[in-house]
Image (tube, rainbow, N blue to C red):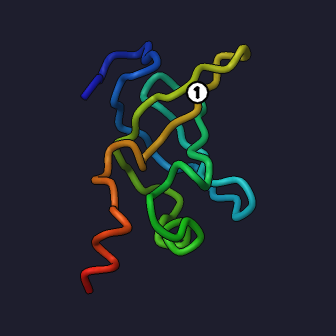
């Protein structure tokens, strides 16, 4: 995990959730103070609204930097650090 102050695309960093917007996702602050967004579709492989409701302001979690925006803010993904849920797993139940 990257702990330095200038994360770039592909880095895994620890962030703190600062706010949650049900229509967008979770906003997070990185150790260097830069804001990032974990969009709804980048929270988990399963039902994002259920997963979003399990997050709270102040939660600390590891995420992957997936995109840098022109204003310096970052798009983040928690989903990219989770195992992929195969549709075959549901068929075997």
- Percent coordinates x, y for residue 42 in the rendering: 53, 48
Is 49 displayed left or right of 76 in the figure?
A: right
Percent of width and height locating residue 1: 24, 29
Work out whether residue 37 or residue 88 is closer to the camera in this orientation and state it: 88
Q: Measuring 61% from the left and 55% from the top, which residue is drawn there?
A: 40
User: In the rendered image, which quarter is residue 8 located in?
Assistant: top left
> What is the residue that sits farthest to the bottom in this orientation?
93
Of residues 87 and 81, which is closer to you in this image? Answer: 87
Residue identifier under label 1: 74
Q: Nearer the viewer, residue 27 or 47?
A: 47
Q: Is the residue 1 above or below the residue 51 in the image?
A: above
Q: Is residue 52 above or below residue 26?
A: below
Q: Which residue: 33% across, 62% down?
A: 86
Residue lying at 29% horizontally and 23% vertically, measured from the top left: 2
Q: Secondary structure at mark 1?
A: strand
Asked if 91 appears above or below 30 in the picture, the reply is: below
Find residue 16 and report its horizontal and vertical position in percent: 45, 45
Q: Quadrant of the C terminus?
A: bottom left
Locate residue 30, reporting x and y percent. 47, 31
Q: Report the front residue among 33 and 91.
A: 91
Q: Crowding near pointer 1: few (<14 within 10 Å), some, many (20+)? A: many
Q: How many marks?
A: 1
- Write the residue at 46% across / 28% down: 65
């Amino acid at each position: 995990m990257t702990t330095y102050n200038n994360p770039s695309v592909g880095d895994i960093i620890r962030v703190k959730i600062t706010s949650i917007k049900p229509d967008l996702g979770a906003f997070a602050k990185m150790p260097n103070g830069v804001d990032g967004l974990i969009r709804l579709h980048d929270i988990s492989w399963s039902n994002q609204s259920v997963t979003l409701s399990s997050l709270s302001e102040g939660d600390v979690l590891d995420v992957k930097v997936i995109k840098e925006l022109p204003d310096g803010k970052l798009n983040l993904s928690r989903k990219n650090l989770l195992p992929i849920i195969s549709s075959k797993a549901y068929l075997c139940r």
